[in-house]
Image: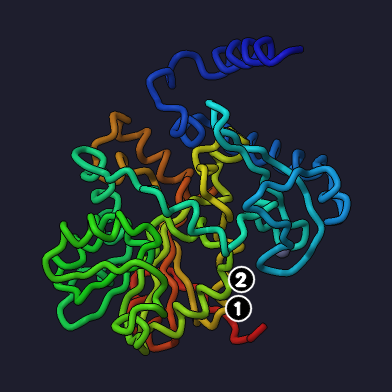
């Protein structure tokens, strides 16, 4: 059967099982609200993993083309070199594509070949960020506010506290941080974004480069560090997270928003998943992110389920019973299409900010 025939059969099947009840529900939400669907998706995913080929790095290198900016890598989290190729995301217009593999030991999903860290600047040098304005900027800031609410009271009162936004872009979050009273600074690899950010900000400052290049940031002592949609772009996450840990003050926290590699949407849409964007390199889940945090010296982590911006902001068109069902399904399955995490530098941070959250303590172990 060809692709079109399979799709037609699926449509008939869905119609027979679910009727027209879910026709108005967006695809990304149907996965959660149609009874039984998430169980079917999970079962198909397990089947896919069992069937996916498993090979040595040498075998994988032989069959995979290496781009000019790229290098082959092994699992960043556990060092296993074996490769389980799963996805090949590609731009519909053919401008880019890459390969995503799974580590058979720890389940980490990563791009392989990866971008060489010394060439990363090339990706962001020429006006990488089309500056978000109007509705897009408002949507982005809404997402920041919803996530800050999910970790209340970490972001409630910034007076007397230092905040670093790593990968600050054009300063949309720094603007909110300074409004809440934080003594805030940001860094970004795109020089144009930094200029734009400093135009937007009154007290907070944005800098071009890495934290160690900016004396005011290199001294550390931050109470909060934020990574808004940045983690998936980092080619050397262990190095970066060791640096973040050392930049935090006692009692400090690191907030991370990134795409969720355990998402039902990834399982349903495969290479067409919206988390596989052009410059994403690594894809974390609530299983794999704690490994990164433990290895880089954090004491604990808490996750906040992501229900989708329209559901959380109350602007969704879903009926109230459907909303409740979606929330329950997100909590019982993948935690949502985005991963929202609060990492605690030490026990003091857990005592101070872990109150209303389900904190997972990470055993101390260097390595
Ligand atoms: Zn691994």
Q: Quadrant of residue 44?
A: top right
- Label 1 residue near ligand 1, CB within 8 Å: no
- The quarter of the rendered structure image containing the C terminus is bottom right
Placement of 21 over or under 355, stated as above or below: above
Judge by depth and name the residue closer to the eye, 46 or 323. Answer: 46
Residue 21, percent across and down?
43, 18
Judge by depth and name the residue closer to the eye, 325 or 162. Answer: 162
Tag 2 residue: 291
Placement of 330 over or under 115, stated as above or below: above
- The numbered dot on residue 230 is none
- 243 sits left or right of 228 in the view: right
- 31 sits left or right of 352 in the view: right
Residue at 65 percent of width and 41 percent of height = 42
- 263 sits left or right of 193 in the view: right
- Label 2 residue near ligand 1, CB within 8 Å: no
Residue at 68 percent of width and 44 percent of height = 99
Q: Quadrant of residue 151?
A: bottom left
Q: How is the image coloured?
A: rainbow
- Secondary structure state at the residue bearing disc 2: helix
**Circle 1 crowding by C-alpha within 10 Å: few under 14, some 14–19, many from 20:** some
- Secondary structure state at the residue bearing disc 1: helix
Q: Are marks 1 and 2 in contact (CB under 8 Å)?
A: yes
Residue 110 in view: no
Ligand 1 sits in quadrant: bottom right
Residue 85, percent across and down?
75, 45
Residue 334, percent across and down?
53, 49
Residue at 21 percent of width and 66 percent of height = 177
Measure the alpha-carbon separation of dots 1 and 2.
6 Å
Placement of 291 over or under 95, stated as above or below: below
Tag 1 residue: 295
Residue 357 in view: yes
């Amino acid at each position: 059967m060809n692709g079109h025939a399979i799709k037609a059969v699926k449509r008939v099947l869905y119609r027979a099982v679910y009727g027209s009840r879910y026709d108005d529900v967006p695809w990304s939400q149907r996965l959660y609200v149609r009874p039984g669907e998430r169980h079917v998706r999970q079962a198909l995913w397990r089947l896919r993993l069992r069937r996916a080929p498993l090979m040595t790095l040498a075998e994988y290198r032989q069959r995979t083309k290496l781009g000019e900016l790229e290098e082959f890598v092994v699992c960043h989290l556990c060092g296993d070199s074996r490769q389980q190729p799963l996805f090949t995301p590609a731009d519909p217009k053919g401008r880019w594509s890459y390969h995503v593999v799974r580590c058979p030991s720890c389940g980490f999903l990563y791009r392989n070949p990866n971008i060489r860290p010394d060439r990363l600047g090339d990706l962001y040098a020429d006006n990488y960020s089309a500056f978000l304005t109007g509705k897009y900027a408002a949507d982005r800031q809404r997402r920041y506010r919803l996530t800050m609410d999910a970790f209340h009271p970490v972001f409630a009162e910034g007076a007397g506290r230092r905040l670093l936004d790593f990968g600050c872009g054009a300063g949309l979050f720094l603007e909110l941080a300074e409004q809440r009273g934080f003594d805030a600074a940001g860094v970004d690899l795109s020089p144009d974004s930094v200029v734009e950010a400093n135009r937007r900000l009154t007290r907070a400052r944005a800098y071009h480069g890495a934290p160690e290049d900016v004396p005011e940031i290199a001294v550390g002592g931050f109470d909060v560090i934020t990574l808004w949609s940045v983690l998936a772009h980092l080619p050397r996450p262990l190095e970066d997270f060791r640096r973040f840990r050392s930049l935090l003050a006692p009692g400090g926290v690191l907030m991370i928003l990134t795409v969720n590699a355990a998402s039902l949407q990834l399982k349903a849409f495969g290479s067409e998943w919206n988390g596989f964007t052009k410059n994403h390199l690594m894809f974390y889940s609530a299983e794999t992110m704690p490994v990164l945090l433990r290895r880089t010296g954090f004491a604990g982590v808490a996750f906040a389920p992501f229900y989708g911006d329209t559901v959380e902001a109350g602007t969704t068109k879903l009926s109230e019973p459907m909303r409740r069902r979606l929330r329950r399904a997100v909590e019982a399955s993948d935690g949502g299409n985005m991963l929202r995490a609060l990492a605690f530098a030490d026990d003091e941070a857990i005592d101070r900010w872990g109150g209303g959250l389900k904190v997972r303590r990470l055993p101390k172990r260097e390595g």
